[in-house]
Image (cartoon, rainbow, N blue to C red):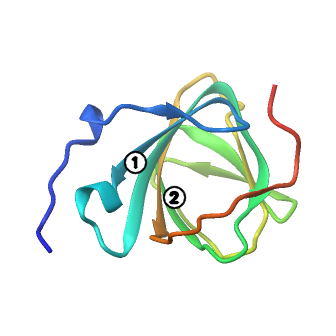
Amino acid sequence: MHAVIRNMNKVRPSPVGNSRGASIQVLLGPAEGVPNFVTRRFTLAPGGRIPKHRHESIEHEQVMLEGEMVLTLDGEESVVRAGDCVFIPAGVAHAYANRSDGIVRFLCIVPRTEDYQTEWLEPPAR
């Protein structure tokens, strides 16, 4: 195992499935030789949305880097802003919405798993 240093601004973003105006960058994970966690950066454009979904066996730790968004956890909406930290237990339904005029960026760290399953609880965002 070796240490890894990587600049997040040099990682190409990919669209987030079933979302509108959302992209993901895998910053650290299996491809970089990271053994236990995957660190991702999500970007939500103004009006961007990731519909309600859950991961039965995967918890999330998130850190808001920029902007303000509505985070829905098991049906309850909360506004989270840059500097806020969030823990989402495994099995909790969650959704993201950028209702502001600015960009939202947050880190999301999850345990590395060979079988990352997402159960979508809403239709794709349009």
Residue ID for mark 2: 84
Please state the horizontal and vertical placement of residue 72, each as a whole percent of the image.
Answer: 77, 55
Helix, strand or loop at disc 1? strand
Q: Secondary structure at mark 2?
A: loop
From the viewer's perspective, is residue 110 above or below residue 40? below
Q: Which numbered circle lies on residue 62?
A: none
Q: Is residue 52 above or below residue 66?
A: below
User: What residue is rendered at 51% in x and 58% in y?
Assistant: 84
Given residues 78 and 42, the one toward you in this image is 42
Q: How far, Cα to Cα, is label 2 from label 1?
A: 21 Å
Q: Residue at x 62, y 51 (%)?
A: 80
Residue under label 1: 26
- Residue at 65%, 42% (x, y): give it: 69
Q: Relative to 107, is 73 on the left or the right?
A: right
Q: Position of residue 112 (x, y in %)?
A: 45, 70
For the image, the number of numbered tags is 2
Of callouts 2 and 1, the N-terminal one: 1
Q: Is residue 89 left or right of residue 6?
A: right
Percent position (x, y) of residue 42? 50, 42
Crowd around label 1: few <14 · some 14–19 · many ≥20 (10 Å): many
Q: Does residue 41 sit above or below 61 in this rendering?
A: above
